[in-house]
Image (cartoon, rainbow, N blue to C red):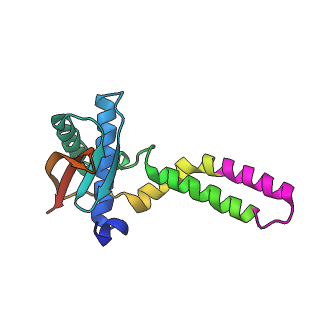
Amino acid sequence: MKATDILMGRRVRQNHALEHATFTILAEWEPTFTGSARSFSDGFVVFAKLDLGLLRRATEEALRRLQAGEAHLAIHPNCGTNLAVGISLVTLGTMLGMASNNTRTRVATAAASSFAGWAAARPLGEYVQKHFTTLPDLNGVRVTEIYHRKMFGIPFIQVHTVQE
């Protein structure tokens, strides 16, 4: 893992956008598709049982559409960013509520912050995706290879990209 993978550098954000767009296309083509993925500076990995040809076609279609300006494909409703934002909001609200000496206030604040975190997670998470964790500007990006791998007995698919 590289430092740029941790710091959400430009290439990680681009690959995150491509990953989301690919999953959106796969869901359009195969409505029962489920899977998860993780983006890095040199591509992304997919945890799903998929035909490599289908994944390549979906990835190329996603790349083409993002390069054509369909930036909305970079935002995905099931992204882990939404979950992280929601958990952060709930945690922050609960911690603030614990500052009270009144038990009733603590319980009410914990309940209210849980609801607020749940309600705000998706819209705020999508805002964070749009401005911080994805970058739909994929000019000069291309997919170089897609192949099956295993690590610690866990199968996944590696998608490599380069910026030219």
- Residue 70 visible in the current orientation: no
Q: Note whether 158 is above or below 140 in the view shown.
A: above
Residue 38 place in picture, x, y as percent: 33, 52
Looking at the rendered image, the quarter that the C terminus falls into is bottom left
Magenta stretch: give its range.
98-116
- Residue 137 visible in the current orientation: yes
In the rendered image, residue 99 lying in the magenta stretch gets the answer yes
Q: Residue at x 28, y 43 (%)?
A: 22
Looking at the rendered image, the quarter that the N terminus falls into is bottom left
Q: Note whether 23 is above or below 86 in the view shown.
A: above
In the rendered picture of this protein, how many numbered marks are placed on residues?
Answer: 0
In the rendered image, residue 123 lying in the magenta stretch gets the answer no
Q: Residue at x 35, y 27 (%)?
A: 31
Residue 90 place in picture, x, y as percent: 64, 55
- Left or right of residue 75: residue 18: left
Considering the whole magenta stretch, tell me its main secondary structure: helix
Residue 73 place in picture, x, y as percent: 35, 45
Q: Note whether 131 is above or below 33 in the view shown.
A: below
Q: Nearer the viewer, residue 69 or 48?
A: 48
- Left or right of residue 146: residue 85: right
